[in-house]
Image (spheres, helix red, strand yellow):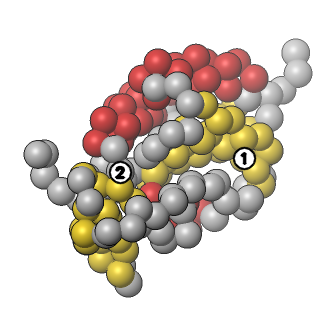
Amino acid sequence: MLKKSEVDIVLVAISSPILIGIYEDCKLLELIKSDEKSSEVLPQIYKNIFETYSVKSLFYANGPGSFMAIKVSYIFLKSLSILKKIPLYARDAFYFNNNEAIKAIGKLYFVKIASEIKTQKLETVPSVKFKLPDVLDYNEFSTAATPYYGIGAV
């Protein structure tokens, strides 16, 4: 039996499309995009990944962004982390969009000034595109992987 490649998996499910990166030796090996709801598509995508690869670490964007997407991502990945004994790491979503504003609610957007995340009212709607890094740098992520919502429930 062939040994499966050891990989790290990065998930950005803050907005559509969902981005999943498969990294081998810290280099982006494969990019999976989906416009489906994360609650519906993540189990199937990760099932396929686990059948093909040996997953050594899980990474995700823990917010700010869509509350539901953040919750689904965290619960899904935390469950995998516990059940399969795989470490889970997180990073704020600004890392994946070149520090551009992220939709909050109404005309409010999350912005990152220095290391502080705040909300600001913006009249012009920014075009936010998330992108996975070509090279995965473990130092950019934290083991404090709980979700960051930024504002309370409305």
135 lies above or below 105: below
Residue extending farthest to the front is 123
For discs 1 and 2, the disc positioned in front in the rendered view: 2
Percent position of residue 147, x then y: 30, 49
Q: Identity of the amino acid at label 1? A: Tyr
Residue at label 1?
Answer: 23
Vertical position of residue 22 compared to residue 92: above or below: above
Of residues 129 and 54, the one nearer the viewer is: 129
- Specify few, some or many for label 2: CA neighbours under 10 Å numbering under 14, 14-19, or 20 or more: many
Kindly identify which numbered label has been placed on residue 110.
Answer: none
**Residue 65: image tag:** 2
Looking at the image, can residue 83 be seen? no
Residue at 56% in and 39% down:
17
The answer to whether mark 1 and mark 2 are in CB contact below 8 A is no
Distance between the alpha carbons at the discs numbered 1 and 2: 24 Å
Q: Is residue 5 left or right of residue 64?
A: right
For the C terminus, the image quarter is top left
**SS under mark 1:** strand
Label 2 secondary element? loop
